[in-house]
Amino acid sequence: MPYRIHAQYSFPPASLMAVVVPWGGQDSGAFTGIVVLSLAAIAVFTSWRDRWIRLFTCMAVAGLLFALGGWNVFHGILYAVLPILEKARNPTRIVSLFGLGVSILAAFGLDRLRLDPLLPIIRSLSRVLIVLAGFIFSLGLAAPALQKPGPSDLVLMLGLICALLAAGLFAWRNRSISSRTLALAVMALAFIELGNVSGAFYRDRKSDHRETWLPNLTQFRDIADYLRHQPGPVRVNASDATGAFNFGDWEGIDALYGFGAGVTRNIFSLDWPSAQTQNLLAVGYSLSKQPPRPDQQVVFHGSNGVNVLKNLNALPRAWIVHRIDQPPSFAELRARVDDVSFDARTTALMLGLPPALQSCTGDEQALISKRSANSVVIDARLACRGMLILADTWYPGWIASVDGHRVPIYEAFSALRGVVMDQGQHHIEFHYRPVSALIGAFLSAIGILGGCAVVLWDRNRSGRHLGVARNT
């Protein structure tokens, strides 16, 4: 993934105001509110010696700095040095670590605040909040007189929250309210702040003109039901008729186009718009409002005016070939796939050294008996030695077995999976078992067990210290 993509999806510094002002920038994912930030500050300035405070403070700061992505030179250094980091193309997502760390610090801060109303930071924090509230309201009063635009309603709400929080801290310092009242008041203010973000899209249920997405979500339901009743795994080209609607993901049907985290380079390099390439990828159906091509047949009329067209020349999801050609380059391979005279039903293409196959005629078949996101099971019958091709993406991490014995997976057509088998009836299984995922699961398990061990060790140590204190 090129670094320009990371830079494009970095958290912009102009959105730092969104930490305290809802929608204060183009990216409001970092919003926490002045109440939560104030409580987190109390935890940091009063309990810094606590290792948990230091841990979550570092987590919050590191999350925010990493989310800056291209605006932070060290992010580029990490991109260049650490393996696989380039796959994380959206640094702004890491801002969630900032929110997690600050939220935990706020809980620490509220507990610390309730224990001691005479903390020196209470007076300092109250003064800062009063100054901020006064500044915001001063702008609001001065703007009309100067005939200038004043603060937005959200900024004025920030000023009100600051004033109310300062009043609550002042009352608590003078012991005019109980600790329970303080806690309830602080949490109420925090929820009011969050409501300016989470409640921004509330709609009136009784309005005759309210917006709703429900009709859009079900507009292709009759088409999806029809496709689900077709034999074999179905793959459809729905982009021409559905536009930005993610038909395949929503309806649970394999689609040629869709919105996702990414696509592998080998499959992406093929000529997707080409009818011949779509036939190779087993795109058996297309959705369209246009008249069908000569190689298509209308098989279903949708209620919304979209027709289901069957691609008559589409290959099945799995088929068997007995000949492999080796083009000199990928450009030649792609050109041959797009050539209408090329027959992929009988001949496969490979850039690497192809395995030896046998030529024969006879009754052969390949039927997919079971399929999930991480596995495919196929029962096949071959008249002689040949290659079974599965029109799914070849990628490292997939393993294959024939009749229980591991076999190599060849990269047919520079993008699809192929396995070689001898004459006879065979049971083929594909499973996705990437080593990186297994290592990640192992490290996650170690982390969980290590965290539990640290907690138990800390409790035992605290218990021993408490016992020694009681004895003395």
Image (cartoon, grey):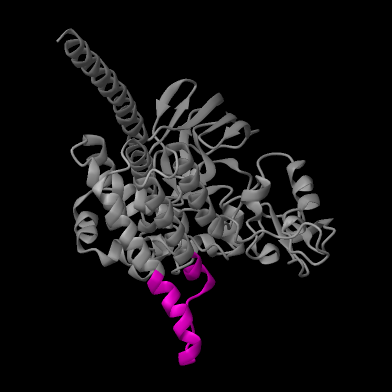
Question: What segment carries the magenta color?
Answer: 134-157
Q: Quadrant of residue 183?
A: top left
Q: How many marks?
A: 0
Q: Is residue 230 magenta?
A: no
Residue 215 in the image: state x and y as whole percent: 77, 57
**Depth order, front residue of 267/42:** 42
Q: Is residue 353 visible?
A: no
Residue in the picture at 51% in, 54% down: 194
Q: Main secondary structure of the magenta part?
A: helix
236 horizontally vs 391: left or right: right
Q: Quadrant of the C terminus?
A: top left
**Depth order, front residue of 83/233:** 83
Is 346 drawn above or below residue 238 in the view shown? above
Q: Quadrant of residue 132?
A: bottom left
Is 340 drawn above or below residue 218 in the view shown? below
297 horizontally vs 65: left or right: right
- Residue most extreme to the top: 471
Residue 345 in the image: state x and y as whole percent: 59, 48
Q: Is residue 318 visible?
A: yes
